[in-house]
Amino acid sequence: MALSDTKLRSLLGKSQDSRTELTDGDGLSARVSPKGSIAFQFRYRWNGQPQRLTIGKYPAMLLKDARVLVGELRLMYDRGDDPRNYFSPAGATKELTLSECIDRWRQDYVHTQLRPKTAALYEAVAVRIIRDEFPGRPIDTINVREWMDYFTEQERVNSKRARTLFVQTKSAINWCIRRQLINGSSLMKISPKDIGTRADRGERVFTYTELARIWVAIEQSRATTPNKLLHQMSMLWGCRNTELRESVSREFDMHDLIWTVPGERSKTKSAIRRPIFDQIKPMLERLMDAYGDVLFPGQRLSEPMTIAAANRFIIRLREGMDLGYWRAHDFRRSLSTRLSEEGIAPHVTEKMLGHELGGVMAVYNKHDWLKEQKEAYELHADKIFWHIKNLK
């Protein structure tokens, strides 16, 4: 039976008659001592002999993190590398300072596994602000009170930024714990809700009448044709700005009518497939005929327009309307919400947005539901165009 946090919490710190072992999957198990101490272990065979590798203790290491680490160890094992080398003395130390932790996290995770824009966000907050705090002190000597005092000072400067800074710092330290670079940190005892306030999340969902008004305002503006079509097509497709703005003609299969966003321009790092449906096809053909390979050129026809240019257009458009504050990104939420109201299945709208499906479906189901996507896109476009015709 698979492990669960509920089961582990029920055993933690509880005395029992003997040592027990609970198995999970991929060689992960949890060994519970008679005093209720819980250690995660990775079991495998090496040179024909059974091996048992302790990878962390609960709750300093959470179950989800243990599963991630075991996945990495399993990859090493499959490559023919002994998983014990993961914790080699050359790469591990129990005396890292905060700055050393941040540096290892930056080098081996932020700038190797994250998209450049995400890495830049971490650099601008966690790295720039907190890296040089508590100089020279091993991270496991910084107590909860000191952490709270530090983040309280940050709250006085900017409450929302303080929450973001805490979350990023905790992520960095947790990464170091999972890789056995440090034993633990008292920071893990603090919850995000204890620090600052959460950054605003988008909540705007347009009505079809509002979408129609924005469409007409775009059409009547003095913007360039690529800028107009970029935002109108984003409204219809519900795609991210960069996915469409940086697209080139070869990504659009006009025979099978499929647009494939390459993984390097996808937030999930996986290719996204969307249908080229009836209402959007003429707009796409117009761009191909006029501009060639780069469909949404900026000042130079050989380069796509910048995000700054696209955003400036939306700001000017918004200032001339009485719809309050909104962003082009709200087109995505509006598409998903309005189509859900029309009975479109969640897995279809998630694919339309370019999201990864959750749970078992993410592992085993690679279907794109292009037929269902096409029907949903056509319904969405029909409703927008109907409201445009009926604007007074």
Image (cartoon, grey):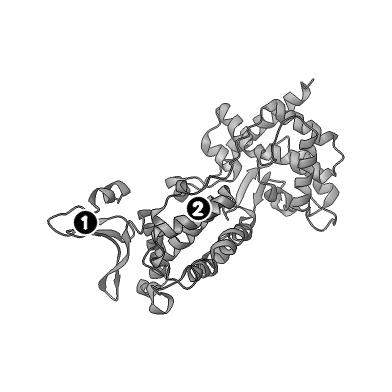
Q: Which residue is mark 1?
A: 36
In the image: residue 174, left or right of residue 347 = left
In the image: residue 357, left or right of residue 8 = right
- Residue 93 circle label: none
Q: Is residue 271 depicted above or below 374 in this figure?
A: below
Q: Nearer the viewer, residue 200 or 265?
A: 200
Q: Are marks 1 and 2 in contact (CB under 8 Å)?
A: no
For the point 35% across and 73% down, which residue is it? 84
Q: Of all residues shown, which one is farthest toward the bottom?
A: 90
Q: Which residue is mark 2?
A: 152
For the residue carrying disc 2, how many other residues have a C-alpha within 10 Å: few (<14), some (14-19), or many (20+)?
some
Q: What distance separates the C-alpha of mark 1 from that of mark 2?
A: 35 Å
How many discs appear? 2
Q: x%, y% of residue 328?
A: 70, 40
Q: x%, y% of residue 185?
A: 39, 62
Q: Secondary structure at mark 2?
A: helix
Q: Is residue 209 depicted above or below 107 in this figure?
A: above
In the image: residue 292, left or right of residue 183 = right
Residue 229 can be seen, yes or no? no
The first of marks 1 and 2 along the sequence is 1
Q: x%, y% of residue 112?
A: 56, 66
Q: x%, y% of residue 151?
A: 50, 55
Q: Secondary structure at mark 1?
A: loop
| Residue type at numbered disc 1 | Gly
Q: Nearer the viewer, residue 281 or 87?
A: 87
Q: Nearer the viewer, residue 298 or 330?
A: 330
Mark 1 vs mark 2: in front? 2
In the image: residue 14, left or right of residue 44 = left
| Residue type at numbered disc 2 | Thr
